[in-house]
Amino acid sequence: MNTKFKLQLTATVTALLLIIAGTTKAQTTTPANAPATTADKVSSTIDQANLVKQQLSAFGPVFKKKPKDTVFVFISNIKYTDANLTSLKSNIAAKGKITVKSTLKEGIVILKVIGTNDASVVYDNLDKNLQKIFEASNIEDNKLLLEYKAQ
């Protein structure tokens, strides 16, 4: 865990504890700034809660759950519009209750295969002619790296 993250998390937890305790840093350090009426106290508490919510939203990606039944297939040396890529996606999707979503990032096609968590099973279930066209260079857990051998 990096230092910046620890400091942000500590500040957020401290703010939450102060809200739960019914006090704020401003109230503890400068009592003159404390809300005078009940309406002011409610407004102040809502503002504090919104601030904490905003701070916690920055940690959203940190706490995201990893997909359990998903294999990521990375394919280099291929164009997104290539007919063999379409065949590959169709072949993978035809194997049971599997959904295939594709994206292109920095010249690499990324297939998100939802419905399985074993990359070796995905590759082993490909038709033999597709295995010749898409050569596996790395198979690990839920990641499969393929090289496209243009014909």
Image: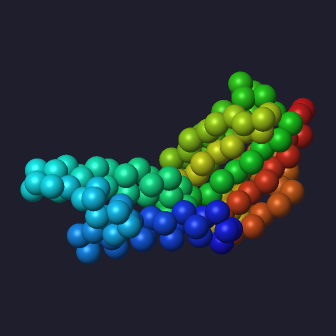
Expressed as whole percent of the image width and height from the top left, the position of residue 137 reads: 86, 57
Q: Which residue is at 29% across, 64% downward?
A: 31
Pick out the residue farthest to the left.
38
Q: Which residue is at 34% across, 73% downward?
A: 17
Q: Nearer the viewer, residue 10 or 39?
A: 39
Q: Which residue is at 69% across, 43% downward?
A: 110
136 relative to 16, above or below: above
Q: Nearer the viewer, residue 150 or 74?
A: 74
60 relative to 117, above or below: above
Q: Nearer the viewer, residue 71 or 106?
A: 106
- The answer to whether 48 appears left or right of 137 in the picture is left
* Residue 67 shows in the view: no
* Residue 18 shows in the view: yes
Q: Which residue is at 74% across, 57% downward?
A: 144
Q: Exactly how many numbered labels are in the figure?
A: 0
In the rendered view of the protein, which quadrant contains the N terminus? bottom right
Image quadrant of residue 149?
A: top right
In the rendered view of the protein, which quadrant contains the C terminus? top right
13 relative to 131, above or below: below
Pick out the residue farthest to the front.
32
Expressed as whole percent of the image width and height from the top left, the position of residue 138 reads: 83, 61
Q: Nearer the viewer, residue 24 or 67?
A: 24
Expressed as whole percent of the image width and height from the top left, the position of residue 150 reads: 89, 34
- The answer to whether 59 appears left or right of 85 in the picture is left
Image quadrant of residue 83?
A: top right
Expressed as whole percent of the image width and height from the top left, the position of residue 116 reads: 55, 62
What colour scheme was applied to this rendering of the protein? Answer: rainbow
